[in-house]
Image: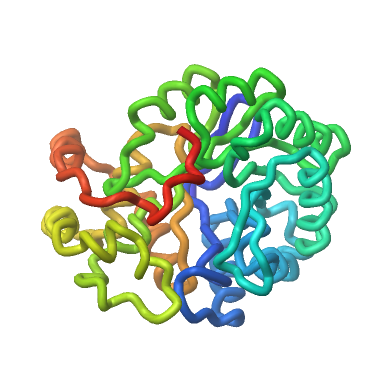
Amino acid sequence: MDDRSLGSEGLKVSAIGLGCMGMSDFYGEHDDAESVATIKRALDLGVFFLDTADMYGIGRNEELIGPVIAGRQDEVVLATKFGIQRDPDDPKKRRINGRPEYVREAIDASLRRLGLDQVDLYYQHRVDPDVPIEETVGAMAEAVGAGKVRYLGLSEASADTIRRAHAVHPITAVQTEFSLFERHAEKEILPVVRELGIGFVPYSPLGRGFLTGRFRSATDFGEGDFRNNNPRLSENIGENIAIVEEIEKMAEAQGATPAQLAIAWVLAQGDDIAPIPGTKKASRLEENAAAADIELTASQLASLDALPTPEGDRYADMSSIDV
């Protein structure tokens, strides 16, 4: 798989990464052995950009990844995040924390769980409205100076916040939801990151799996799956299925799967973009990785651009999104 440059500071990642969240949390049952096999298969395929966070499984996702990449750190670009604190006794309870002292605690805890001396890319997972971004990024920059972090990133940050953060220390990547099912980043986020020379990392490039075509009704999501409470996929899935049906028609004509077409569209939005589709299964990983070989024509891109706008909010509670 080809590499792509994220930002102007020298970070290179695989064109398609692997989001590891679902291996430990949010998408129902999980199998650690299967997840380990999937991560190993990713590295074999050249998918070496791995994405995790300290809140996925309340640390368990980092603990899962650490032993897999032990001895293979030179083959991996590992991104993790801090900033969302969950209550171990009630994981649904959470708070946003961007205090400098917490940043220092969080990076040390992540390094311990991962078994690493340094992470490649360290994101603030959500912006803390009660802490100036300059203070949070200042503490993140300290971690760079101490050799614990190579590059800094922000997740779900507004254009103004990105500018202010970048003035404190170069921001290498901004991560936000972006797909044929969610295109808000086109309005302000993509223009500002390109102006500042920052890379863009779309999470959920498959619309939380919806764009694969495997889910046709709200009853298709299993017990414990957070999509049961996602407005677009619970309350409005009937209205939004038309988007998937159009992608399916185009994918069939292309000789691809809907997932591959959706990822190919994201890749076609610019060489400064590296999506991180998540999966627990090696077979889905292989399917997703093959999207890197698809070249869409101008006509196909125009047809995909013309897809309807989805109905419903992308989170049940949008209050944690910096706007």
Q: Nearer the viewer, residue 212 or 48?
A: 212
* Coloring applied to the structure: rainbow
Could you tell me which residue is drawn at 42 percent across and 46 percent down? 177
**Is residue 77 something one can see in this rendering?**
no
* Vertical order, 199 against 33 (above or below): above
Could you tell me which residue is drawn at 69 percent across and 64 percent down? 62
Residue 149 point in image, percent of width and height: 77, 41
The quadrant in which residue 251 appears is: bottom left
For this orientation, the residue located farthest to the right is: 146
Q: Is residue 194 left or right of residue 300?
A: right
Q: Is residue 125 left or right of residue 258?
A: right
Could you tell me which residue is drawn at 60 percent across and 79 percent down? 32
**Is residue 302 something one can see in this rendering?**
yes
Could you tell me which residue is drawn at 71 percent across and 24 percent down? 169
* Vertical order, 39 against 275 (above or below): below
* Vertical order, 309 against 54 (above or below): above
Q: Nearer the viewer, residue 21 or 131?
A: 131
Residue 2 point in image, percent of width and height: 49, 44
Q: Quadrant of the C terminus?
A: top left
